[in-house]
Amino acid sequence: METLDRVLGSVDNALRTLVGASHAARPNPAGPDNAAAPPLSEAERRLAGALMRVDHVGEVCAQALYQAQALTARSPELRARMLAAAREEGDHLAWTGQRLAELNDRASLLNPLWYAGAFAIGLAAGRFGDPLSLGFVVETERQVEAHLAGHLDRLPAADRRSRAIVQQMKDDESRHADDARAHGAATLPLPVRWAMRAASKVMTVTAHRI
């Protein structure tokens, strides 16, 4: 019955993620009032929207990965850790979704595909045991941290709201990686890390447009 409850919880999370029903537990780091934000040119708005769509896809994938790894965790402690991280990533999902709406842009049309693929990867990572599952978290979060740093470089200087959100996300991802390392993460083989980077590149390039 406990396993069934966890599966049903994962299904509920998937549905809420894909229909945009996630709610942040923490205040939006950009603040509550978009009306006070400086106006963006049309080119700046389109660029910010595309980058925020990619970041939103990353949070869709994060929900899938953490839910899958929680399902396959060998210890209750790791399961609780994965679900706690998923809740923080849920804040990111809500913030990026809100910012997309403020920019009059949309989420990726391929979100169900991204979620399904990430969930399958998370299940596979979890099957190799807790140290490798934590190692997968470390590598994923380090890649995301670098990706967000790149977005901070590319976002329009005037788009302070998007920049505040991305900076907080970057800080959280770094902390998640450090936490996983501190709790016994194994180092993934180099070919696995290369494959993860290649898959991430495909996702980011596609989500920028679709």
Image (spheres, grey):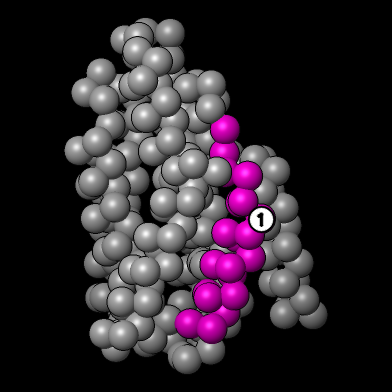
Residue drawn at (61%, 51%) of the image: 111
Graded by Cα atoms within 10 Å as few (under 14), some (14 to 19) or many (20 or more), the crowding at tag 1 reads: some
| 77 to 104, vertically: above or below | below
Residue 115 horizontal side relative to residue 75, left or right? right
Residue drawn at (72%, 80%) of the image: 3
Q: Position of residue 61 (x, y in %)?
A: 52, 59
For the residue pair 109 and 160, the one nearer the viewer reads as: 109
Q: Position of residue 135 (x, y in %)?
A: 34, 80
Is residue 121 magenta-colored? yes
The residue identified by callout 1 is 112
Tell me the amino acid under the disc marked 1: Pro
Q: Main secondary structure of the magenta part?
A: helix
Is residue 53 magenta-colored? no
| Residue 30 at least partly seen | no
Q: Quadrant of the N terminus?
A: bottom right
Determine the secondary structure under disc 1.
Answer: helix
Residue drawn at (41%, 51%) of the image: 205
| 130 to 96, vertically: above or below | below
Q: The magenta stretch spans which residues?
A: 106-125
Residue 95 horizontal side relative to residue 67, left or right? left
Q: Residue furthest bottom?
A: 128
| 166 to 137, vertically: above or below | above
For the residue pair 67 and 102, the one nearer the viewer reads as: 102
Q: Position of residue 38 (x, y in %)?
A: 31, 10
For the residue pair 43 and 80, the one nearer the viewer reads as: 43
Q: Position of residue 62 (x, y in %)?
A: 48, 59
The quadrant holding residue 162 is top left
The quadrant holding residue 139 is bottom left
For the residue pair 189 and 191, the one nearer the viewer reads as: 191
Residue drawn at (72%, 72%) of the image: 7
